[in-house]
Image (cartoon, rainbow, N blue to C red):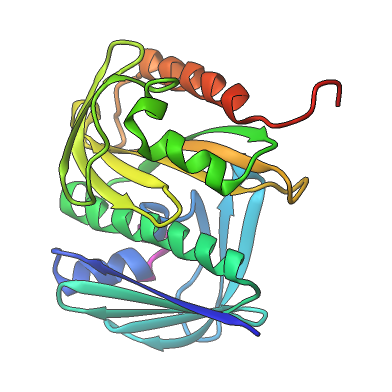
Amino acid sequence: MSRRIQVSQRVAAPLERVWQACADPAGIAAWQADEVQGRIAAGEQLVLRWPTLGASVQLGVARLQPGRRITLEAGSSRVDFSLEPGRITLTQEGLKSSDEAEGTASAWKLSLSLLAHYLDHHDGRTRQVSWLVKQVRTSVAAIQPFFTDDAALRTWLTQAGQIAAEGDPIRWDLAWGECLTGTVLARTARGEVALSWQEQSQSVLVLRSLPSPRSQHERLVAISWSRWGAALPPAPDTAEGLTRALARLAPLLDQTPTGT
């Protein structure tokens, strides 16, 4: 039996700006896929790519109601974006299992929170995304505490600070000496989180896990860092700090038996 999910996000931006961010490839690349090609027009095709993850999807534009609704489809899966003043609601049908439905709902919740943040702080600017990824033999349940439990976070990412509820302010002292203050933009049922980062030009840090292309017994543990603007200052210390943090997390999660 196929599964259906629905995710809703409050968006303060005017409806026409939300539409532009959903109906233009450059707008979509500012909050969803890392690369977008094609056209949002009835009967046209759209290709979304995440090169670092080696992932892509081709979508057909099945329905278009300018300013209000976009329906995209790929095989038996169908995604509908419904816009109204102050809110966007996403409905996806044709998911094959409860696990796929839960993971997809979590991913869309994170993406829609980026959409709202982009429109509030960076509307019209180009997004640059840095991905850090480790493949480990672990489970969703094992990963979750390391994104949401204060003590577990201190084993790899933070020195001090607590995870807050969605919509609440947050302050973390990071392991390499930087400070992260911002807002919890999203906190999903799977423990994935998206955080705004005021000190880094209102960028967004996302902690998440993804299915492994290699094995159902493995997961990709990932940090994505989205920044917007054509002339961003370099941040080598931050990038190095995040890289080292993920390198500390991977062995804490890896359940591969010794010698395999």
Left of 31 or right of it: where is 220? right
x and y, in percent, of residue 181 in the image? 18, 30
Residue 178 higher or lower than 5, as above or below: above
Magenta range: 23-27
- Magenta segment, prevailing SS (helix, strand or loop): helix
Residue drawn at x 42%, y 48% as measured from the top left: 191
Residue 259 higher or lower than 97, as above or below: above
x and y, in percent, of residue 144 in the image? 47, 43
Residue 138 higher or lower than 90, as above or below: above
Left of 88 or right of it: where is 93? right
The answer to which image quadrant residue 69 occupies is bottom left
Q: Is residue 129 visible?
A: no
Nearer the observer, 198 or 152: 152
Residue drawn at x 32%, y 76% as measured from the top left: 89
Nearer the observer, 196 or 37: 196
The answer to which image quadrant residue 154 occupies is top left
Quadrant location, the N terminus: bottom right
Left of 103 or right of it: where is 1? right
Residue 108 higher or lower than 50, as above or below: below
Residue drawn at x 25%, y 51% as measured from the top left: 118
x and y, in percent, of residue 121 in the image? 17, 47
